Image (cartoon, rainbow, N blue to C red):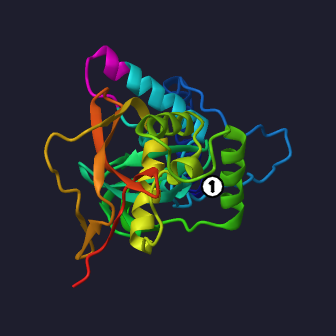
Amino acid sequence: MKDGREQTPKAFYRALAAFALALGFAQAASAQVTSTSYRGTARDPFVKYRPPVPRKVEKKVNGPIQPPPIRARIENYKAQKLAAMNLQQPAPKPTTALLLSEVQVTGIFRTPRGYAAMVEATPIKLSYVVYPGEAFYDGMLVAIEETRLVFRKQTRWTDGRVEVSVDTKSLRQPNAYADSLTTQRGMASGVAAEAGANSPDALVATFRDAHSSRDLDAVTKLFNLDGADDDTKRVVNGLVMYLSGMKLADVQFVTPSRNVSHDYTIRGVKYKFDTPSVGDFVITVEAENQAKIPLVLPVGLKDGKYFLSTGRPEQK
C-alpha cells in the first residue's frame, strides 16, 4: 500500500508536466502558423552601428527683397509697353523701371500743368519730366515743392509685408565740374556764345540748334538774366532742363494780336517784365502720348538784342 501511495503523486506530476509541454508546443505551432508577415529590422544587423547625422536646418532670415538689375527692369518695362500698345491701352511711363535711389533731381519749374520736375536716371544717364502721381519701381511721387520732391516709398520684405515710408530728394546743386561740361558742350556746338540774338529769326534758329545739340548753356543765354534774382534763375534753369528732355515739334516767333500779360508769382512775390514785349516765342513740344504742348514766352528787345524776357520782383 505504501508503495502505491508514493507512486501516485509521481505519476500525477509526470502527467501534468507532459500536458504543460504539449500545450507549449501547441502554442508555438499556432504562433508559427498565424504569423505570415515579415518585419525587417531598422538597420542591417551585420553593419556596425553609426549614429544618424543631424540635418542642418537653414533659418530663414527676414529682410527686404532685392530688386532685379536695371537691365532686367528695362526689358520688363518694354514688354509691358508693347502689351499695352497691343491692347490699345495707355503705356506705362519709363520711370516705372527706376528705383528712387537711382534718381537725381536736376530741375523744378512751373508748366501749364502745374509744378513739374526734371529727374536724371543715373544708371542710364537719361532725363525725364515728372509730375505728382508719377509711378516708380519702388514708390510714387506725391508732391513737388520748391526745392525738393516728396515720394512714398514701398519696401517689400521676404515675409510678404510691405513697408511704406516717406522719401525726399532735394534739388541737385550745380558744381564746377558740371558747369565745365556745359561750357565744353557749348563751345563744341558752334552756337554763338554771346547772349541774345540779332533778330527774331536768329533767335528761333539759335534755339533750334542749341536744342538739337542739347547745349543747355546756349539755350540759357537766350534768356535775359541780367539782374535777375535766384528764384528767376532757378525757374529758367528748370525750364531749360525740361525743354532739353522733350521732343521739339515746332518753334516760331509770332506777333501777339492782343496785349497778354506774362506776369507771374513765385512764393507770394509778383514778378513783372522789365523790357517791353515785341512778340511771343512759341515752343511746341511733343509729349510721350504724342500730345502737343505749347509754351509761350515773351520776347523783349534790349540794347539791340532779342531776348526771351524774364521778370523782376515788383517794387512795392
- Quick one: 231 or 113, which is closer to the camera? 231
Residue 226: image location, x then y, percent: 48, 67
Q: Is residue 245 visible?
A: no
In percent of width and height, residue 83 lies at 36, 20
Q: Give the vertical position of 263 relative to 290 (above or below).
A: below
The residue lying toward the viewer, choosing from 263 and 101, is: 263
Q: Amino acid at mark 1?
A: Val
For the point 84% across and 38% down, which residue is it? 46
Q: Is residue 134 left or right of residue 5?
A: left
Specify start and end residues of the magenta stretch as a single range. 83-91
Q: What residue is at 32 percent from the left and 51 percent from the top?
A: 131
Residue 280 in picture, x, y percent from top left? 29, 43
Badge 1 crowding class, 10 Å Cα cut-off, few under 14, some 14 to 19, many 20 or more, is few
| Image quadrant containing the C terminus | bottom left
Q: Answer with left or right where residue 43 lies relative to residue 105.
A: right
Q: Quadrant of residue 232?
A: bottom left
Report the quarter where the N terminus lies: bottom right
Q: Residue furthest left?
A: 258
86 falls in the magenta region = yes
* Count of picture labels: 1
Quick one: SS at disc 1? loop
| Residue 272, position as x, y percentages in the image | 26, 67
Task: State the residue at coordinates (67%, 59%).
Answer: 178
According to the picture, the residue beneath numbered tag 1 turns out to be 57
